[in-house]
Amino acid sequence: MRVKIVVEKLNNVPLSYDHLYFLSSMLYTRLSESNIKLANETHSHTGFKFYNFSQIIPSGKFLMNKIGIDFSSGYFILSSPDTEFIRSYTEGLLQKPEFNLGDAKFILRSVEILPARSFNGESLRFKTLSPVYVKTKRELSGKLVEWDLYPKDGKFYANVQTNLLERFEEFYNKDPEDTHFEITKVHWSKPKRVKIKDNYRRCSLMEFDLSASPELVQFVYDAGLGEKTGVGFGCLEVVG
């Protein structure tokens, strides 16, 4: 299930480019105000998170500077295969529509339930609404360290598939009937560095062709691509 959250900015402070963590914190607060049981379960759960959201996307004119991006109105996409998450998040936002993302102040203007999509296994083109984050472990000076991956690294694609299959199995408590999943072509990618708490993650905005089984296409569309989708990485939309 997907919803489009339309917001208006209430002050002249630019929105930080690194606003995904602010947005994830705000959404968790609204979830706890709407459904404390679900919020506690989500916070205490040590596995994957099964919801996803995009960066805030300006509507109309906007200005960019060193601090961030300034605009009057915009929106973000909130998505999950679990409709209870969507309902609880949106109820929390509707009950308390004003919020801050850093020093930028916003108010909720509308919530639109987007039409459901069905996929039949055809090759589709997707683009990211927030960067995709993928990591691995590599030996450095005799120690295994986390290493962030870009699409130019072949390990990126293997880890994306492994992560997706593990998340699918945890959510549905079963393996997919068809595990076919392949990013067949990357049309473009742009490296990004995003701050989450006190750490920076190297990730990628990209547009790509995907060939996969219908159930995996549906899951990645609803739950996001790659790692740390619960803090907003890997939100996708179909191009065309």
Image: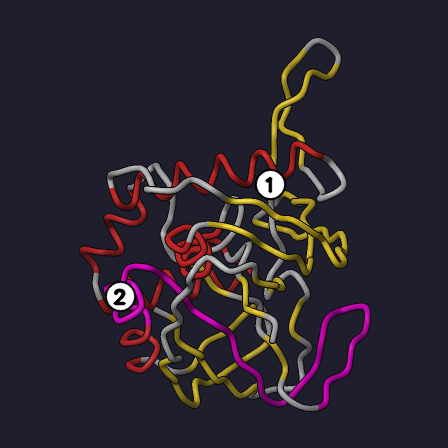
Residue at image point 55% right, 55% down: 234
Q: Position of residue 18 (x, y in %)?
A: 65, 60
Give the residue at mark 1.
134
- At label 2, which amino acid type do we have? Thr
Reading the image, the residue beneath label 2 is 83
Q: Which residue is drawn at 44% across and 79% down?
A: 4
The answer to whether 170 is drawn above or below residue 80 in the figure is above
Residue 69 — which label? none
15 relative to 200, above or below: below
Image coordinates of residue 89 in percent, x first then y, are 32, 69
- Indicate whether 37 appears above or below 100: above
Would you say the residues marked 1 and 2 are in contact, meaning their CB atoms lie under 8 Å apart? no
Q: What residue type is labelled 1?
A: Val
Helix or strand or loop: what does disc 2 sit on?
Answer: helix
Q: Nearer the viewer, residue 73 or 99?
A: 73
* Occupied quadrant, residue 87: bottom left
Q: Earlier in the sequence, mark 1 or mark 2?
A: 2
The residue depicted at 48 percent of the width and 38 percent of the height is 163
x%, y% of residue 21? 53, 57
Q: Residue furthest top?
A: 142
Q: Compared with residue 150, is residue 79 higher up or lower down, i.e. above or below?
A: below
Is 60 left, or right, of 45 in this rendering? right
Give left or right: position of 12 versus 43: right
Q: In which quadrant will I find the N terminus?
A: bottom left
Magenta span of residues: 61-89
**Residue 29 placement (x, y as % from top left):** 35, 63
Horizontal side, residue 207 vs residue 114: left or right: right
How far apart are the two marked residues, 1 and 2, measured between alpha carbons? 26 Å
Q: What element carries label 1?
A: loop
Q: Does the magenta stretch include residue 87?
A: yes
Residue at the (48%, 64%) spot, across then down: 53
Dot 2 alpha-carbon crowd within 10 angstroms: few under 14, some 14 to 19, many 20 or more: few
